Amino acid sequence: MTKLGALLDDYLFRSASDSDRDQKFEELMKAFLRTDELWSARFDEVWSWESWPEHEGEDSEIDLVARERESGSLTAVLCVFHDPDSDLAKLDVDAFLSASNHAPFTRRLVIATTDTWDQESSDAVRDLEIPVQQVGLAELLSSSTDWTKFDPPAPEPALTSGASATAT
């Protein structure tokens, strides 16, 4: 198994919740965009939605915002942790497409742990005024990113018999 595969398995099987898993994946994809040779040459800054200086509102279907190095244009990014053996459905991208369908965004990027999109989702992103680029699992696996630098957090130590979880 590849190091990326091991990380994704760790996120899937050892995350406390789906939101915890998704947050870990978003952070990993932020690191991917900052370290991959192709993407780091394209973007000079990548923020989580919450840390982007211009974000509005508590929650958005936009996970990351990346700034184009040459133009300063902004790209809205959706990170989808998905079963690699199933298609990405239109429902998986609808809210993101709606949330990112306006200025200041000039491009959109969907990074997913699957390489296949169903016909409806493919049709939904075709010929949009703000284009959508796709990055799938194959591109992540072939990335120049050194995934070994992104070790999963160490598991919480198990309490031994007679140990208390509260401090005295």
Image (cartoon, rainbow, N blue to C red):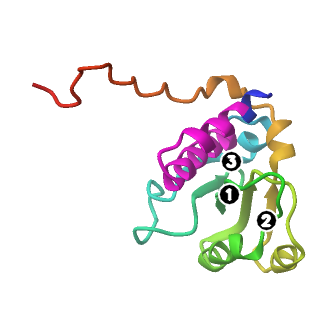
Front residue (pair 152, 32): 152
Q: Residue at x 81, y 74 (%)?
A: 121
Crowding at label 3, few (<14), some or many (≥20) Cα neighbours within 10 Å?
many
Residue marked by disc 3: 43
Mark 2–mark 1 distance (CA, rounded to whole Å): 9 Å
Give the amino acid at mark 1: Val
Sequence order check, earlier mark of 3 and 2: 3
Residue marked by disc 1: 80
Residue range of the region highlighted in magenta in the rendering:
6-34
Mainly helix, strand or loop, the magenta region? helix
User: Quick check: marks 3 and 2 in contact, CB under 8 Å?
Assistant: no
User: Quick check: marks 2 and 1 in contact, CB under 8 Å?
Assistant: yes
Give the amino acid at mark 2: Leu
Given the current orientation, which residue lies at the most extreme left position? 168
Give the amino acid at mark 3: Phe
Residue marked by disc 2: 88
- On the rendered image, what quadrant is the C terminus found in? top left
Q: Quadrant of residue 44?
A: top right
- Tell whether position 154 is magenta: no
- On the rendered image, what quadrant is the N terminus found in? top right
- In this view, 26 is above or below 129: above
Q: Quadrant of residue 133?
A: bottom right
Given the current orientation, which residue lies at the most extreme front position? 161
**Residue 73: x percent and y percent?**
66, 62
